[in-house]
Every structure is written in C-alpha cells, then in structure tokens.
Image (spheres, rainbow, N blue to C red):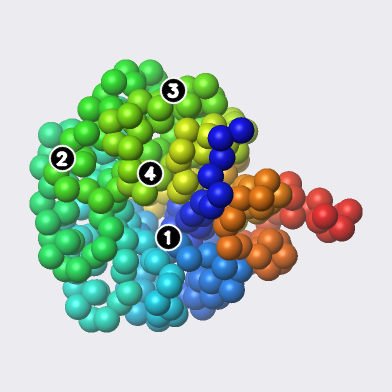
Amino acid sequence: MNLPKKIDVIDVTMRDGLQHEEIFIPLASKLYMAKKLIKAGFKRIEVGSLSHVAYVPQFKDIDELLMELPKEEDVEYTVLALNKKAVERAVDLIAKGAKIDRVLTGQIATSEAYAKKNMRKTHDELFAEAEESVKVLHNAGVKKVVANIGTIFGCPIQGAVPIERAYEFVDRCFDIGFDEVEHSDPDGKANPKMISEYFDEILARHPDVEKHSFHIHDIRGMGIAGYLAAMQTGIKVFDVSVGGIGGQVANIVDRVPVKGSGEYYFDSRRTGLVCTEDFVSMVNDMGIETGIDIEILFSFGREMEKILGRELSSLTSSLKSMSGY
C-alpha cells in the first residue's frame, strides 16, 4: 500500500460538530474541549463559526471563546468566516489579540442549488466575494486562507453534479490566491474508487499535498474507507469529529426554532463526520504518525457523551471499554 508516514488530523468537533447540536453548549465546556484536544496531541483544531447569531446561535459566544483559547504556539486554530461581515469580525478579533491561524472562507458548493440555499448567492457572486476575502485576511496576517469546495460527488438538494465543475472550481480558488482547498463530501456519497480518481486528477493539477484537505460526512458509513483511498493518492490532511458528531446547522436550539440553514436534508441521525476516535485508531495501528494519544482521546470521547447528554457513534471507544482495546 502507498501510505504516508505522517498525516495531519484536524478535529472539527467544536465547529462542525457543535453546529448540529440542538442544545447550547456553554463557553466553559467549549474551552474544556479545546484543552482536552490539545492535551491529546491535536495541533489543528477548528473552533467555531463567525456566522450571524440568528443563523448559528451555538456560536453566540465565539468572540469570548477566541479570546480565551490557550495561546499555544504550535496549535493552529481555524474559524469559519463565510461572508464579508464574518471576515471583518475575524480581522477585528485578530487586532484585539485573538489567535486565528486559519480561516475557512469561500464555501463554494459545485451545486448551484446548494450554494443558493446555504450562502444565498450565485457562484459568480461567491467567487467575487471570496477573492476580496482572501486579500483582506492575508493583509490581516492570517497564515492560511482556505476555500471549501463542496458537493463534489453529489448534492442532497440537486442530485448529481458534473465532477468537472469541481476541477474548475479548485483551479479558480488557487488562481485567486487561496492557500488551501478543503475538498468536501457533505452527502457522504463518494465511494473509494470515486475518491481515488478525483484526487488523482486534483494532484495532477495541483501536486502540493499541503494545499489540500478532505472533509467527509459519514452518512452512508463509507467515510473511513474514503479517507484511506484519499491517503493512498497522497492526501495527508483530514477533518474528523469526536464521536462522529456534526452536520447541517441546527434549526432548533434549546427548544427554540431558529433560522439555521432551513429544513434538514437527511432524516438519518448519522450526519456527522468520520469519527475522530475510529480514524485515529486505524491510522495509529497502521503505523502512520498522528501525534495523538489514543487513551486521552478515548477518555475525552466518553466525556463528550456526558456533555452532550447522549451516546455517540465511536466504535473503537466502546470496544476499548469492553475488551481492553
């Protein structure tokens, strides 16, 4: 097998994971999550969204969180800033002393229907705004400005989308100055063969693997196999969430209906990303370096069940407790 010696695991529990939760998670709990992830060895953590509180009330405390996060030199914090106002907030927070190392902006789904529903803009409008955001964030000193190319393998609203559009959009993102592209499968639709073929083409066009990351929602249970397929093509950066939580922005928070992003796409309760514990267990056992302490991670996963008030979907964490894994 053609496998890397080392990979980067970006934990997105605090952003993608929590945005789907229908209860508000207090600031103290979010800070605890960050500290436990750092203790477990994570160097790259996605900590929240700067979207308007009316749409994502889970992050009404994001300013305070960003100011209070541990300022570890070797830990990279990512925030989501998807429009001009959010980018301006990020710049203002940086000026106030917040540690924001990586900003995910330019969420450009290849599906026009998905883009209009989630971003309320056309593709041309999204690219024009993204080009300006890249300049503003670089000028503010942000080290990595990242575009998200979504619905690559299909859209939960529109259905099939030509794969060639994803190649075109990735080219355009690098042309306008993005440092990295996060390739996203929010529908969890891609099988390993599709993923291998996709990244073979992407890396032929843009061979620097440091400029790419992969983000799968494990809705159909193929996510971990998809990550392995991507790894074999050379991809080394992967998004995961503790207990496999995450998904579409919640439309109810603390029993109050909110705007969110509208009606949920999926009836399934399994809408989150590839589970952090399961993925790290797999790659650690394969001898691939992650720098992550699996025992601390397992312990944190069980604490997350108590924080969220429900059982999560890690397979390896429960195996450990039953059989001394």
* Between discs 4 and 1, the one toward the N terminus: 1
Label ID, residue 253: none
- Measure the C-alpha gap from mark 3 to mark 2: 23 Å
Residue 222 position, x and y percent, is 59, 31
Q: Amino acid at mark 3?
A: Glu
Residue 148 position, x and y percent, is 32, 43
Q: Secondary structure at mark 4?
A: helix
Task: Tell me which residue sits at (40%, 38%) in the image.
Answer: 184
- Measure the C-alpha gap from mark 1 to mark 2: 25 Å
- Measure the C-alpha gap from mark 4 to mark 1: 20 Å
Label ID, residue 209: 4
* Between discs 4 and 3, the one toward the N terminus: 3
Q: Is residue 220 left or right of residue 46?
A: right
Residue 239 position, x and y percent, is 48, 49
Outermost residue on the right side: it is 323
Q: Amino acid at mark 4?
A: Val
- Measure the C-alpha gap from mark 3 to mark 1: 28 Å
Task: Tell me which residue sits at (32%, 56%) in the image.
Answer: 80
Q: Secondary structure at mark 2?
A: helix
Residue 295 position, x and y percent, is 72, 65
* Between discs 2 and 4, the one toward the N terminus: 2
- Which residue bears the numbered disc 2? 175
- Which residue bears the numbered disc 3? 197
